[in-house]
Image (spheres, rainbow, N blue to C red):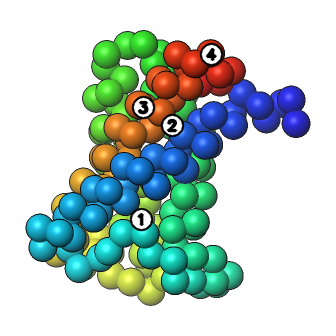
Amino acid sequence: MPLLLPFLPAFIAGALAVLVFHQSALGLLHLVGLTPRTPFVLGGVPPLGVPQLLSLMFWGGVWGLALLPLLRPLGDARCWLRGLMLGALGPTLVSWFIVAPLKGLPLAGGWQPAAMATGLIVNAAWGLGLVALLRLAQRAGIPGG
């Protein structure tokens, strides 16, 4: 367990960034009519039937771990831009070109501008949230934050 301790804040920050930032952005986009998708969906997703929100939070944690080295140093003002860009592009491109075909869905949301914009915007919000939460952990003196 001590070996995992430095990485735990990045996983938790990534998961919480989904809950707070990603889902809030999705809710706003739904509210203005850009997407039919709604936030905080608890319906099960195949193959295990895990609630969609928990699945998104898990993968947000994994992405938090993956992006942590690329966001350092967190005190650098440019980490906000890196969080925005890496958040928007990394998870979105993987979703469009790896996850979608595995699920039998069209590439890049069927190349529909609103669907593509939704993915980029909610994941960019997640990336900014990840940076904010990691910086908060760092300021709180949490190891790995």
Check disc 2 and report its element: helix, strand or loop. helix
The earlier-in-sequence mark between 3 and 4 is 3
Q: Say which label, 1 or 3, has the lower sequence index.
A: 1
Q: Residues within 10 Å of mark 4 (few under 14, many from 20)?
A: few
Residues under labels 2 and 3: Cα distance? Answer: 10 Å
Task: Say which amino acid is labelled 4.
Answer: Gly
> Which residue is drawn at the image coordinates 12% and 73% (left, top)?
33
Quadrant for the C terminus in the image = top right
Q: Which residue is mark 1?
A: 95
Which image quadrant is residue 29 in? bottom left
Residue 59 in picture, x, y percent from top left: 56, 57
- Quickly name the residue at label 4: 141
Per the model, the C-alpha gap separating discs 4 and 1 is 34 Å
Disc 3 to disc 4, C-alpha distance? 15 Å
**Where residue 7 appears, x then y in whole percent?**
69, 33
The residue tagged with tag 4: helix, strand or loop? loop
Q: Nearer the viewer, mark 3 or mark 4?
A: 4
Residue type pointed to by label 2: Leu
Please name the residue that numbered disc 3 is placed on. 131
Q: Which residue is mark 2?
A: 67
Q: Are marks 1 and 3 in contact (CB under 8 Å)?
A: no
The foreground one among 138 and 89 is: 138
- Secondary element at image label 1: helix
Q: Residue at x 36, y 49 (%)?
A: 21
First of labels 4, 2 by sequence position? 2
Q: Is residue 68 visible?
A: yes
Q: Residue at x 31, y 19 (%)?
A: 78
